[in-house]
Amino acid sequence: MNRNFDSSSRESRSELRGKRRKTNLILNMLIGLVILLIIFVSVKIFFGGNDENAAEKEQQIESKQDEKNRDTEENKKSAMDEKKDEKETDSETESTDESKETAANTEDDEEIDLVPANEEEAVVTEGGSTGNVKKTIENPSWNPIGTTQTGEHYAVYDKESVDWAEMLQAMSYATGVDQSNMSVWFLGNNGFNKSVGTITTKDQKQIYRVYIDWVDGQGWKPTKVEELKEVEKK
């Protein structure tokens, strides 16, 4: 009996040891699996987080770069606009300067240098063609006043014309009455390229009838001045 009991005891201990080994093996496997899961999750979190941070940083860098590029483009565009404005301003300034220069040149062209007449050569005769003439003055030293006109000439009696302005200048030259103090009562035709006009000072104390002839290329030349007693509107 004792032998049977010992034999049964041995088998029971052997089975118990086998069950313990199996249990330990399973526990070890489970522990190992848990450890592997922990490692996997840790690696995933660590490297995954780094990837997300890297992506976020990369996105931030790209955003900053895009913003920088936009600023650069805007600065370039602004600089180009400023240069364009400067060019337009310079162009406008040059145009204005050229206009002023042209106007100045035109004024210079319109200014006619008159050769003063020698009053000592004047021939003064009492009376004249009518009873209204106090005296008649003729001076061989009178010269054509000059002209800005070119080409074939026909007398023009338009008050806005260059011809009209030059005829007034010729009458002022012959009489000594400044145009700023001149009243024109009549200015008209006296033959082909010949004119006659009646002028006074604004106070009408001096009254003249002036005869002028056109000289080609040289302008209007006074030929005779009559000092009148009264104004004649013709």
Image (cartoon, helix red, strand yellow):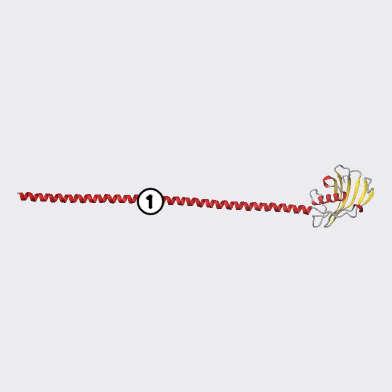
Residue farthest along the top direction in this orientation:
203
The amino acid type of the residue labelled 1 equals Asn
Q: Nearer the viewer, residue 232 or 96?
A: 96
Q: Nearer the viewer, residue 68 or 213?
A: 68
**Label 1 CA crowd tier, 10 Å (few <14, some 14–19, many 20+):** few
Picture coordinates of residue 112, whole percent (x, y): 81, 53
Q: Residue at x 56, y 52 (%)?
A: 77
Horizontally, residue 130 falls left or right of residue 155, namely right
Horizontally, residue 25 falls left or right of residue 184, namely left
Q: Which residue is mark 1?
A: 50
Horizontally, residue 106 falls left or right of residue 1, namely right
In terms of secondary structure, where does tag 1 sit?
helix
Q: Residue at x 47, y 50 (%)?
A: 64
Q: Residue at x 61, y 53 (%)?
A: 84
Q: Nearer the viewer, residue 143 or 197?
A: 143
Query: Which quadrant of the view contains residue 200?
Result: top right
Q: Nearer the viewer, residue 185 or 100?
A: 100
Horizontally, residue 70 falls left or right of residue 13, namely right
Q: Residue at x 67, y 52 (%)?
A: 93
Picture coordinates of residue 7, whole percent (x, y): 8, 51
Residue farthest along the left direction in this orientation:
1
Picture coordinates of residue 222, whole percent (x, y): 87, 52
